[in-house]
Amino acid sequence: MPKICSTNTVTHTIPSVNAHIFNPVITGINHSAMAIFTLTLGICTLLFLLSKAFSTDTLTLSQSLHDGTTLSSKDETFELGFFSLRNSTNRYLGIWFKNIPVKTIVWVANRDHPLKDNSTKLTITNDGNLLLRTNNNTVHWSTNTTTKPLRPPILQLLNTGNLILRNDDDNSSNSEEKFLWQSFDYPCDTLLPGMKLGWNKKTGLNRSITAWKNWDDPSAGNFTWGITFDSNPEMVLWKGTSKYHRSGPWNGVRFSGAFAGSNRLTTHPLFVYELVNNNDDEVYYSYRSINKSLISIVVMNQTLFRRQRIIWIPDNGTWRLFQTAPRDICDTYNPCGSYANCMVDSSPVCQCLEGFQPKSSETTDLSQGCVRSEPWRCRVEKRDGFRKFVGLKYPDTTHSWVNRSMTLDECKVKCWENCSCTAYANLDIRGAGSGCSIWFGDLIDLKVVSQSGQYLYIRMADSRTGEINTLIFI
């Protein structure tokens, strides 16, 4: 459900006249009437040109953005201005789509600091900061950046919906390295194409998405989407401090918890998805639309506790739900406990993996997870081995380790040598597979995803040491 707001904005653009249609044939008219017509046409043309002149995407150091005025991106896709929500008189500075009739807010500057009237203005300071300041100079919000400008700073709303502070005349490149500050580093409840969800490892900046508290209050709720900051990162939805949904780690093609049949991340015809993990610089997830005319955003819904991808349908002027997470009980975090497989179409939903038995004496309740059904002894012949599982979401990576250069055989040896290691897999499943992921401790949050080429080798008591059983779930 998109957020609807009311605005008091000045419209800078008037409908243009279609020149190749507006070509009147004038006959039987006196010179006075002709002069009046020519003057009227000239005035209309002048007003149109003036409106275009005042429709700007930038704000300079000497200017202020007052309540009732806006900035528009050059392509008229996004607009920055002050707004109120339907059932509130509070005022906020935000960004919304300008090119669709349903005003959909995608970013709010002062989400936790609402304004009580329309006397506030947005200004730029000499040290390269944005301020929301009232007439009596009370500051309600600031960017608080410490990056100092080399030249007078300028504010610009890009066609991507990114609001940036940059040095004046430094517009030859939209490289974020040259930005003094950008709104994409401080997202609210919406992920736009090209935005980064994740970490800047050098600065410690965590770009996460947090839902509005409710549809009339954009302040931060307790439903958050982010990327884990560990050796094998994955996307997680949080309810407060508790994990609510986990994507599984990236396997080189898609997140391992994604259904290949319905959510083929890198091969989907509408979107291209990407996980970038530069060891020293950053780790982030982003997406882009293959068709540039397609308008799609990802929104956090606090009411339903769902992450929703919606697509704008111009034919009927509405947003349509395209994807949601979590999808079902097996898509929530760890409903079945350790070594238990969640199968949404089975009864019971939770079932122990082959070679494991319920931990609880109450066999109908597998919420406590499962344990090995035979005694296991580390590196003892006929009491230690691995079984191959196909079609399982990779376990929680909180306690895991990766190596990008190891072969699968080397990965197996690495796991075998450590008695705390409980599973291993290729880090990247593309081609013949490459790299190594190993897990320590209990394996949790498992489910069937039917991913071809995604193999998980789980350690267990196995009298056939070295022999691998293939368990395929369809």
Image: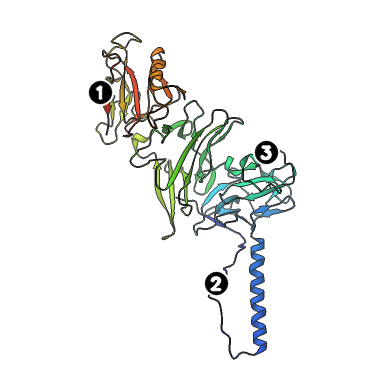
Q: Nearer the viewer, residue 454 or 302?
A: 454
Which residue is at 26% across, 36% downward?
345
Which residue is at 47% across, 38% downward?
274
Q: Residue furthest front?
A: 432
Q: Quadrant of residue 144?
A: top right
Q: Residues within 10 Å of mark 2 (few under 14, many from 20)?
A: few
Q: Nearer the viewer, residue 363 or 330?
A: 330
Depth check, mark 2 against mark 3: the one in front is: 2
The disc, 2 or 3, on the residue closer to the chain's N-terminal end is: 2
Residue 157 visible to the viewer: yes
The disc, 2 or 1, on the residue closer to the chain's N-terminal end is: 2
- The amino acid beneath tag 2 is Asn
From the top left corner, tell me how far across and down residue 191 is, in percent.
50, 44
Q: Nearer the viewer, residue 164 or 238?
A: 164
Q: Quadrant of residue 46?
A: bottom right
From the top left corner, tell me how far across and down residue 405 is, in percent.
46, 23
For label 1, the residue is 363
For label 3, the residue is 145
- The amino acid beneath tag 3 is Thr
For label 2, the residue is 18
As helix, strand or loop, the secondary structure at mark 3 comes to loop
Which residue is at 65% across, 70% downward?
47
- The amino acid beneath tag 1 is Thr
Judge whether 57 appears above or below 416 on screen: below
Q: Residue furthest top?
A: 380
Depth check, mark 2 against mark 1: the one in front is: 2
Q: Residues within 10 Å of mark 3 (few under 14, many from 20)?
A: few
Q: Quadrant of residue 74?
A: bottom right
Q: Is residue 404 left or right of residue 458?
A: right
